[in-house]
Amino acid sequence: MVVNLVQERLGASSMAEQVLRTIGPVVLLGPPGAGKGTQSKRITEHYHIPQVSTGDLLREHVRQQTPLGIEVQAVIARGELVPDHLVCDIVAWRLRQPDADRGFILDGFPRTQKQAAWLDSFLKFEFFETGKWASWLPIVIRIQVDYNKLLLRITGRRTCPTCGAIYNVHSNPPLVDEICDKDGTKLVIRDDDRDEVIRERLDTYERQTKPVAEYYDKLGRLVTINGDQSVDDVSAAILKEIDGRACGVASGTEVKGN
Ligand code: ADP
Ligand code: ADP
């Protein structure tokens, strides 16, 4: 189990301290295929804070053919970014849910400088100034992986449409070909994980999301992790950063240990 593995490595004191304190906002940055989704799920398991994946939220709108889903599906299919105001509205709605009170992991957001600036003011007004958290500064973790490895990771990615589990035909195959280990559902390839779209997404990352990393770097808030290690080693490096930086005690939102 990741929790045990990381506790062993960090020499963590007690499970309750590790798992139940206020973590605050965690941002995972990185190109498509870097491992943001994979790592978000592990951080969620460890700290019991929700993963907020704008990609997953948008895909769900497309799947349900909501007015927003219909509006954005062609943009996603081309590998371009959905307009900032639409994504920020979805994020605001999600972060106002009560399960986000001790913190959350933003996976795939912010992806533009406008989104980053919006996030800073949202966190300040909704979490810091309301007295929920001691700080509004997110822990920003960039997962870095070599371009050619990203291509291999994305083309090998398979996901479970039922539980969201992420597999890879090369590095993390399911026990039975194309079937989810957890619930037996047939795995799918994402529509935008096709060759021509993958390149567009990687270019979009270079043009529009790299400046976000620079924005946080200039503010002294960026931590870069080598994503070209085993999933367990990347998890251990990320949890170590979060343990060292979590934003402090929230008033009135403490959760008791079990
Ligand atoms: P992202 O959310 O950044 O697009 P994912 O978490 O979906 O990335 O990972 C992309 C693919 O790479 C998946 O198939 C996943 O199983 C695989 N993967 C993730 N982390 C690693 C790793 N450290 N080593 C090898 N493969 C990985
Ligand atoms: P990846 O695994 O490639 O990092 P995601 O699942 O995060 O991809 O996103 C898939 C697509 O959803 C993106 O290519 C983009 O079209 C749209 N999207 C996701 N997050 C955002 C965002 N923060 N801003 C704009 N578009 C987004």
Image (cartoon, grey):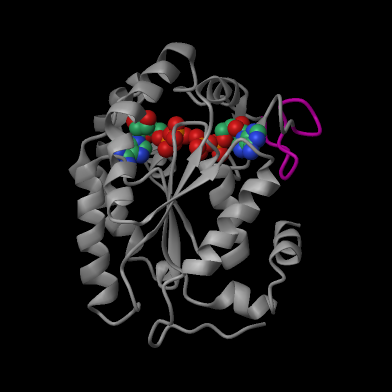
Residues in magenta, as a range: 174-186
Q: Nearer the viewer, residue 173 or 30?
A: 30
Residue 31: tell me if it is visible.
yes
Q: At which x and y percent is residue 58?
A: 36, 39
Does residue 41 lie above or below 248 as drawn? above
Q: Nearer the viewer, residue 102 or 175?
A: 102
Residue 62: tell me if it is visible.
no
Q: At which x and y percent is residue 204?
A: 32, 26
Residue 184 covered by magenta stretch: yes
Q: Which residue corresponds to the image point at 60% horizontal and 45% vertical from the top-left? A: 163
Quadrant containing the C terminus is bottom right
Q: Is residue 29 left or right of residue 170?
A: left
Q: Is residue 72 left or right of residue 167?
A: left
Main SS of the magenta part reads: loop
Q: Which residue corresponds to the image point at 48% horizontal and 84% vertical from the top-left? A: 254
Q: Which residue corresponds to the image point at 75% horizontal and 59% vertical from the top-left? A: 5
Does residue 43 lie above or below 245 as drawn? above
Residue 171 covered by magenta stretch: no
Q: Residue furthest right?
A: 175
Does residue 156 lie above or below 102 as drawn? above
Q: Which residue corresponds to the image point at 20% horizontal and 52% vertical from the top-left? A: 117
Q: Residue furthest top?
A: 196
